[in-house]
Amino acid sequence: MTYCVGMMLDRGLVFMSDTRTNAGLDNISTFRKMSIWETPGERSITLMSAGNLATTQAVVSLLDERGKSPDDRAPSLLEVPSMFQAARMVADVLRDVIASHADTGQRADSTFNATLILGGQIDGGPHRLFLIYPEGNFIEAAQDTPFFQIGETKYGRPILVRAYEPEMSFEAAMKLLLVSFDSTLKANLTVGAPFDFHCYEKDSLKTGPTGRIAGDDPYFQSISEGWGEALRDALDMLPDFTL
């Protein structure tokens, strides 16, 4: 399983993804689920994936090839005129990849299923965030839906719903996301560190701060332990139930 979150802020976009992949309890490995394409000063686009690894690898590889081959850039993430057109192109690629597997006897709603989060900004437009479904349709983040999750979403969602604020800083957003990821990995062994992140500053039109946070990272450990203690303290402060 996977856990990825894309978050829309007034300041820009924050992305975080885990790296655990598994095909059973005895076959666990690490794989990067975040990809970034950019033309500095003109566009920055980030993609995160959840689902069948072969499907998501094929999608990213096809998008990479379109960006590297001058003779096959129609369409390319490096040339589409808007983020909406980028979302349409990625959705089409995802649907085509799943359909190619379906032709060999698999179904899009089973083994080769995949879901994507796409976000970024292209010169002349605002920063935008999309959730792309395996059927090839997609939705866009808005005021009522300011963040998207894919993969194992249920354990990390409550803290996001309660604590998210659009005006929060990148630093505060990173802290919130790490609490969400910590809650998820403690409840589901198929989600695990290290975590990849990217903070995109709106109107910068270039890749922002990126990195990888290991499971034994001192800051992450302090967040994990501090959140556990804070929850226990909060529970103790609540009035006891009367039988």
Image (cartoon, helix red, strand yellow):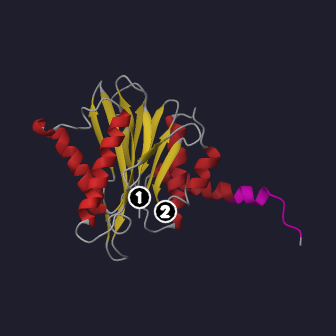
Residue linked to disc 1: 193
Query: What amino acid is found at the position of numbered circle 1 in the picture?
Result: Ala
Q: Is residue 183 magenta?
A: no
Numbered tag placed on residue 110 in the rendering: none
Total numbered labels placed on residues in the image: 2
State the residue at coordinates (33%, 77%): 26
Q: CA distance from mark 1 to mark 2?
A: 8 Å
Q: Position of residue 228 (x, y in %)?
A: 62, 58
Foreground of the two, 7 or 211: 7
State the residue at coordinates (35%, 75%): 24
Furthest residue toward left: 71
Foreground of the two, 91 or 123: 91
Residue linked to disc 2: 185
User: Which residues lie in the magenta part?
Assistant: 232-242
Mark 1 or mark 2, earlier in chain: 2
State the residue at coordinates (29%, 70%): 106
Furthest residue toward right: 243
Quadrant for residue 79, please give it. top left
Q: Is residue 8 above or below residue 153?
A: above
State the residue at coordinates (22%, 38%): 75
Q: Position of residue 153 (x, y in %)?
A: 51, 58
Foreground of the two, 237 or 35: 35
Q: Secondary structure at mark 1?
A: loop
Quadrant for residue 199, please give it. top left
Residues at discs 1 and 2 in contact (Cβ within 8 Å):
yes
**Image quarter hosting the N terminus:** bottom left
Can residue 166 be seen in the rendering of this structure? yes
Q: Is residue 238 magenta?
A: yes
